[in-house]
Amino acid sequence: MRPTLADLTAYLNQLQDATPPDLAVLQSILDRAESQVLTVLRSLTADPSLDFNDYGSVSSVEVTGTRTSLFLTLPQYQYGSITKIEQLTTQGYVEISGWTETQQGLYWQYGWNASSVLPTMYRITAIWGYGAMPDTIAQIVLSLAVNIWRSKESGGFVDTVGVEGSGGIRAVAGLNKSDQVVLQAWADQHRQVAV
C-alpha cells in the first residue's frame, strides 16, 4: 500500500519533533519521496510507465516476439491471470495452446517466433500492471520522506562531511545504501527484458 500522510505524521510524532508539522508541507515531502523512489525504479527496470496501483480488469496487450525462444518475457502482469494467447497470422489472430506460465517467462513448447524471421505479434489477455505498492517499497518512501523532513533545516542530501579518520557528520536526505540495495533487488525481479 502507498504510504499516506497519516503514516508519515504518525512516524514523525514518534520522533517528538518540537514543532508540529505543516500538513501541506508534509504532503509535498511525501509526494517528492514517492516520486524519487518511482524515478529510481523506472530507471532500474527500464519501464518508464512503472507505477503502483491496484490491479485492474482483464485486458489484451500486444507483445512482439523478436527472437526465437521457448520463453516470452511479458510486461508486468498479475501472475496466473493469463486467459488467452493469440498469434497474428495471415488469417488474423489465432488462439494458441500448450503454453505455461513460469517465473522465467511464458513457456511455449513450440517456441515463440519460431516460424518467422520477422518479429511475430502475440495478443495476450491478462490483468496487467504492477499491483499495489509492496510494503518494502512503501517503507523506503516513508524513510526517505522522514529523512527529507529531518534534514530540511540543514539543506539535506549530504552523504558525509569531514575528513577521513577524524569523524564526521552524516545527514542523508536521499536514498541510503541499504534502500538502494532493496530497490535494485526489486528491480532485478521486475526488469523488462527485450523479447
Image (tube, grey):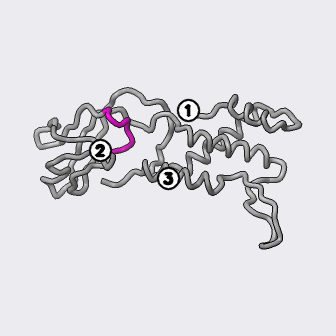
Q: Give, as a single range, the part of the protein colored magenta.
A: 74-81
Is label 1 in a helix, a strand or a loop? loop
Q: Could you say where residue 155 lies in the image, as x and y percent from the top left?
A: 80, 53
Relative side of 48 to 117, left or right: right
Q: Is residue 80 magenta?
A: yes
Reading the image, the residue beneath label 2 is 102
- Residue flagged by tag 2: what amino acid is it? Thr
Q: Is residue 49 above or below residue 46?
A: above
- Earlier sequence position, callout 2 versus callout 3: 2
Reading the image, the residue beneath label 3 is 185
Relative side of 156 to 85, left or right: right
Q: Could you say where residue 161 lies in the image, as x and y percent from the top left?
A: 79, 65
| Residue at screen point 78% across, 35% down | 14
| Residue at screen point 82% across, 67% down | 167
Q: Is residue 43 above or below residue 83?
A: below
Q: Residue furthest right?
A: 18
Pointer 2 local density, CA inside 10 Å: few below 14, some 14–19, many at least 20: few
Reading the image, the residue beneath label 1 is 1
Q: Could you say where residue 140 lies in the image, as x and y percent from the top left?
A: 62, 44
Number of labels in the image equals 3
